[in-house]
Structure formats: structure tokens, C-alpha cells
Amino acid sequence: MRTVSNRVLPLAARYGSVLLAAVLVYYVIREPLTVAVSSISFAVKGDFHTTNQGDNQGNLPVIGGEGTKDKERLIPADAPEAPVEDIPEKNPQKPIGEEDGVNHVKKYKPDPIPYAPIGDHFPWLTHSESPPPVPENNLPPHPHVDEATPLLIGFTRNWPLLLQCVSSYIAAGWPPEDIYVVENTGTFHANRNQELELQNPFFLNYTALGILGVKVLETPTLLTFSQLQNFFLNLALEHNWSFFWWSHMDVLVLSDEDVKKNDRDHDWDHDPYATIYERCVGLLRYLNGPDMPPWATHFFAFDHLALVNRDAYLEVGAWDTQIPYYSSDCDMYLRLHWAGYWQPQSEAGLIFDVASVLDDIAALFRVPGAHATFKGDPVYTGSGDGSSKDERAHHEAEMKREKDMYPWVEKEGETFAHLVEVAGRMQDLKWVDEGLRRNEWQNRQTGGQTDPFYRDPEGFAAGLETLVDAGRRVFADKWGHRGCDLLAMGIEGKDAWRLERDWDIRESPGSIATI
């Protein structure tokens, strides 16, 4: 017995502390631990997203769910149910702050400064069912020349400016049946159905254009500049035009009645000068003559008026529509250059870049009583209080000449020399202050709020500016350079999208030059 007890005592001493610790854990720590676990809230079975029947998901035990057996529960069945926090569901459509009981207050921009409503700039068309006669020396060739000579003019905004542009081409000698106004307003048939009012920026008068004898084509939706140019190429394919001319709508053209050059194919014995149309046709024949290099574009006052070789444009991939507005011309003409195409420039007539409209467009047709005047003409607005003595004297002389012209115009109509002077002043006015306001004509009409497809004029302009900026960035990334001087930088056509940027992207993006 003594031997056994000597063996038990060491074991009891060794394991006694372990048994004591186990007892303490069981009786002292178990209760607070059970309370802590019971306060945890578990989702019920209905809160879980399950797949369809037959996917074996239904047989899986759900933690804390009603389908679990008692032995599967982590919480004793007799434990009190823990409170569930009620979290309100947020509505993402509500204005910011409304969930907090604060009503959102809309802040409106200041009302735009209204322009004066536009009026009737061509009363002749309003009160007549035929256009005014074209000056005799400007009449188109009859019969028509052998070549197709389509002239495409895109239109989006400012009906009076378009009407002046089209009328100037007709008065200068372009056959009206060869002129196509491409309506790019995005208003579908609204203009054709006479659903837009005159003050709507996108208003277009089909009746007036029909009286003038020109054709109107619609784009399927509102297109960017690059898309519109590709639409022109598509029209050329559909109409089998190998060549066509296109013009900006903010120009006024005159045939140069003082030109004495020996233009090709002109009958100088019976006609004192070649019209802008006759000179354009002569240049087309010249470019397609023998031993001429392959050509793509012929510029007249850059692309205010341009002659296009359709197939050359298609061969290099047409216009890049990812560059929607400014810089798209740089991209297109440079790619044609790199492809080896000749793109010369010459004169065919007088082309003025304008933003104003004659008070009476009939003056271009030399209609007696139709005077070449326009709002904002510096001759009539005065020379200003700060002008010098010589400037005031010059202004007085101009005013006297205008007054002396009045009786003549009342009886005989406008003269070529006076039309050139007035058109020159219109161009100078557009480019005053380095042309900062040269595009204001695009926002001059602000009505049509109840018309179909109404767009806020300022918002429309702001959206275009965003696209313009985006296009400039695309151009810069495409060629690794901001600016049209790619030739000077040694950049080639094969470098598209292959060059690293040559500017610090951390700097302000600034502006990109255009051709």
C-alpha cells in the first residue's frame, strides 16, 4: 500500500492543476460566452438568393435557418431571439441629400442674352414663285457641260446664312439643279413637313430652296463633320459621281468680273469673263488631263470650296470619324499627302468667309432696289469716339459714297465693285478681334421651344465643344503630337497610333492648331 501511494501522489501533483483549470473554464467562462454568441443575428433562409429547383441547393443547411435541425443550430433553441437592425433601403434615383431630410435645391444658370429675331432676308422668294434672273454674263452653259458637277453644301443651323450661300452660287453662275443642300439637322422630316418655326436654329425652308431650283437631301440623323464628309462620299458612290465639289455654308461667292486670265475652255470673243462655275469645270478638266499626277483635292480658298476625287479619299480610308470636328481636316489631308496624292490650290472666283447676312439677298442678283447692306456694317455703325481725325475723315468719305450709290441701285441694281466692297467688310467683321466671335452665327436663332426635336441652343453648342475637345485629344494620341505640323516633325502615315506623346501629359492640354 505504501508503494502504491508513493506513485499516485506524483501523478496527482502533476495533473491536479490541469483538472482545476478545466473546471474553471466549464463553470466560470461558459456562461458569458453563451450570452455573447446568442446576440449575433443570423439571416434566415428567405434572405438568401438561391438558384432554380433541381440544382441541389435546397438540401444544403442554411445557417440559423428554419430548416436546420436542432443539433445543427449554433444557438440553443431556448435562447432569446436577438433584435434585428432595420436598415432602410436607399433609392439611387433620389437627389443627393434627400435621404437625410434635406431637399435638393436646383440652381439655374443665368438666362442667355437673346438675339433679335431673324426676319425675311429674301422678300423676292416670299412673294414670287420663281427666282430672280441670273445676270446675263453669269448664266450657266446651255446645254450642260459633259461632266457631272454636283456641289454639296451641308446645313445644320442658321437658315438665312445658308440661303445667302446658295443664292450667291446661283447668282455667280452655278447651275441650281447641280446644287445639293444636305440637311444635317437631326430633325428627320420636320422641316420637310413644315413643323419648325423660323426662329428655330434648325429651321430650313424647303419651299424657298425649291423655288431656287436646288435639291435637298436628308442625313438619317445628326452627323458630325467627319461623318458628314463620309456621307458626301457615300452620295458620290450612290450617284456615280467620280468627282464633286463641297462648300462651307458660311461663305459668299462672286464670279470675278475683273479677271483677265486666259482661262481654259472660255469663249473670250463672246463673254467678258469666266464665271466661278466655268473656271471650276476648266480646272477639273485640267486635273484629269494627260501626264497629270494623281490628285485627291483641289482647294479654292482652302476648303471653303473644294473639289474632291472620290476614289482617292476612299483608297486611304475616308475621314476618321473618331476625330469628329476640328483636326479632322488635318488628319484627312495629311493621310492623302502621305499616300502620294497631289492637292493643289488656285482661284476660281471670289470667296468670302462671312458670318453676316445681307438685308436683301436679291442684291446678289442685281435686282433694282435691293441694296447690299447688312447689320453691323462698320460704315453705318460709326468710327467710334476714340478714332483719329484721319479715321473720321475716311468714314465720312465711305458714308458719302454709300449715299451716292443709293439712287443708282434703286434704278439699276448693285454693281460688282460695290458687292466686293460689302462682302469684304462682312468678312472683316467676322474676323474682328482675331475671330474670337467668328462662330456666333451658329447660335443666332434661339426659338422653337415647342417644336419637335427641340434642343437648347446653348446646350447644343456646349455638347459640340465637348466633342471638339475629345477629337483634338484623339488626333494628338493618334499621331503622338498636338498640332497639324506633323510634316515638320518628321511624322509619317505609318506612325499612326505608334508614337509616344511628345508632350508632358501633366501639363494643361491647351489648344491644338488646325489647318
Image (tube, rainbow, N blue to C red):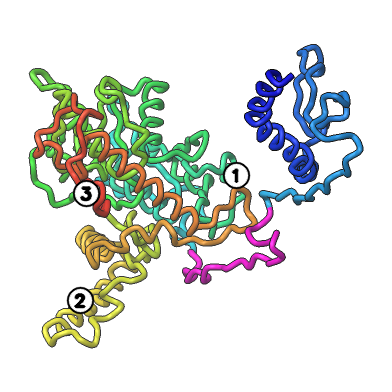
Q: Is residue 257 left or right of residue 188?
A: left
Q: Residues within 10 Å of mark 3 (few under 14, many from 20)?
A: few
Determine which quarter of the picture holds residue 12: top right
Element class at badge 2: helix
Amino acid under disc 1: Ala
Disc 1 versus disc 2: distance between alpha carbons? 45 Å
The residue sitting at 81% across, 16% down in the picture is 59
Between 82 and 382, the one lying in front of the other is 82
User: If you read the primary sequence from the N terminus, does the residue marked by circle 2 or circle 3 appear first?
Assistant: 2
Give the main secondary structure of the magenta stretch: loop
- 99 in magenta: yes
Mark 3 = which residue? 513
Q: Residues within 10 Å of mark 1 (few under 14, many from 20)?
A: some
| Residue 506: image location, x then y, percent | 26, 50
Mark 1 = which residue? 190
Most extreme residue toward the right, as rendered?
78
Does residue 360 sit above or below 498 in this rendering?
Answer: below
Mark 2 = which residue? 398
Residue 394 image label: none
| Residue 246: image location, x then y, percent | 31, 38
Does residue 67 sit above or below 123 in this rendering?
Answer: above
Q: Is residue 2 left or right of residue 364?
A: right
* Span colored in magenta: 94-118
Disc 3 versus disc 1: distance between alpha carbons? 37 Å
The residue sitting at 39% across, 55% down in the picture is 161
Location of the C terminus (image quadrant): top left
